[in-house]
Image: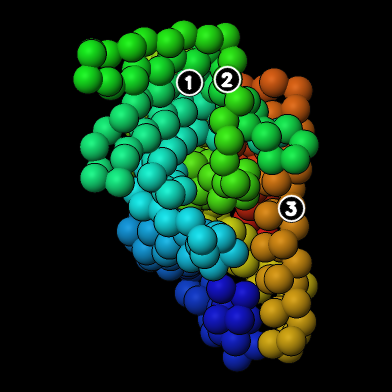
Amino acid sequence: ALLGLGNLARASELIVMRAAGISVARIAAWTGLAGVVLCGLAWLLGEYIAPPLEQYAIQQKTLARFQEFSQAGSRGAWAKEGETFISVQQQSADNRFAGIFVFRFDEQRRLLSLAQASSASVGPGNEWVLENYEESAFTPEGVEVTREPSRALPTRLAPEFLGLASVNPSSLSSRELYAYVGHLKQNGLEAARFEAAFWARIARTAALIVVVMLAVPFALGPLRSSGAGARTVLGILIGAGFFFLARLLESGGALFGFDPLVIAWAPTVLLMLTAAIAIARTR
């Protein structure tokens, strides 16, 4: 936007438009239409292209490091070690996992036992400890049920491998984020991080319109006679500044427990106010 409007300004075309009675607000509205196009492209990328590619990249990177194990599944992680299958539905910080299922089979692929644990932790030496452990063993005599507060799980699986179970907000589409937030709230789980990521996705997409319109006061003001290099540098600085400000406010807001809606929209609202004041002061 800075380059395009800057070229119009250097050729005095913006001055002619202003002399013809076209207001700065109207020029900003026209520029905002380009932002709408960018919003559409960003939405397509964020919904249908980037999330599946990122998930695929994470899987390939992890499987390349742990080639002795096999994995499948698009939700959570399914790991196979010998005749044992381990399913992990969610990962949180400090190598803690939730929703653990352990399936053991014999060489004829007959199910020997099915175990479930509400959570698991990985300590030093790659030792897995399953908490609230329940196991159903299938024997010729019937089903034997075992319940223990905790059970050590002998496995060579590293936490990094089961890191595939971690739900990263950036690897989910907006629809998936919204559904996941609803799932967490229904189950009484902490959803603030994912709710903030959902609203931040929408806010950042909307900010594309505003940040494009912010080029208007620069093109009509200090950059009217500047070269393309100066406009490019300024555009990079504005974009990087908005990005770092957004990350700072999101991290600080999450640390102090602010409302996810406020955390997500604060940078965009601040950018809107800045653009509105700059456009209103432009003559």
Residue 189: x percent and y percent?
Answer: 51, 18
Compared with residue 197, is residue 44 higher up or lower down, i.e. above or below? below
Amino acid of disc 2:
Arg
Helix, strand or loop status at disc 2 = strand
Real-space CA distance between mark 3 and mark 1, rounded to the nearest whole angstrom: 40 Å
Residue topped by disc 1: 117
Q: Residue at x 59, y 15 (%)?
A: 150
- Mark 2 and mark 3 in contact? Answer it, CB < 8 Å: no
Disc number placed over residue 137 in the picture, else none: none
From the image, which quarter does the C terminus lie in?
bottom right
Real-space CA distance between mark 2 and mark 3, rounded to the nearest whole angstrom: 44 Å
Residue 103: x percent and y percent?
Answer: 36, 33
User: Looking at the image, which is closer to me, 77 or 102?
Assistant: 102
Which image quarter: residue 249?
A: top right
Q: Residue at x 43, y 10 (%)?
A: 146
Amino acid of disc 1:
Ala
Disc number placed over residue 151 in the picture, else none: 2
Residue 107: x percent and y percent?
Answer: 30, 46
Q: Dot 3, crowdedness within 10 Å: few (<14), some or many (≥20)? A: few
Q: Residue at x 71, y 71 (%)?
A: 236
Residue topped by disc 3: 244
Helix, strand or loop status at disc 3 = helix
Q: Residue at x 49, y 42 (%)?
A: 165
- Mark 2 and mark 1 in contact? Answer it, CB < 8 Å: yes
From the image, which quarter does the N terminus lie in?
bottom right
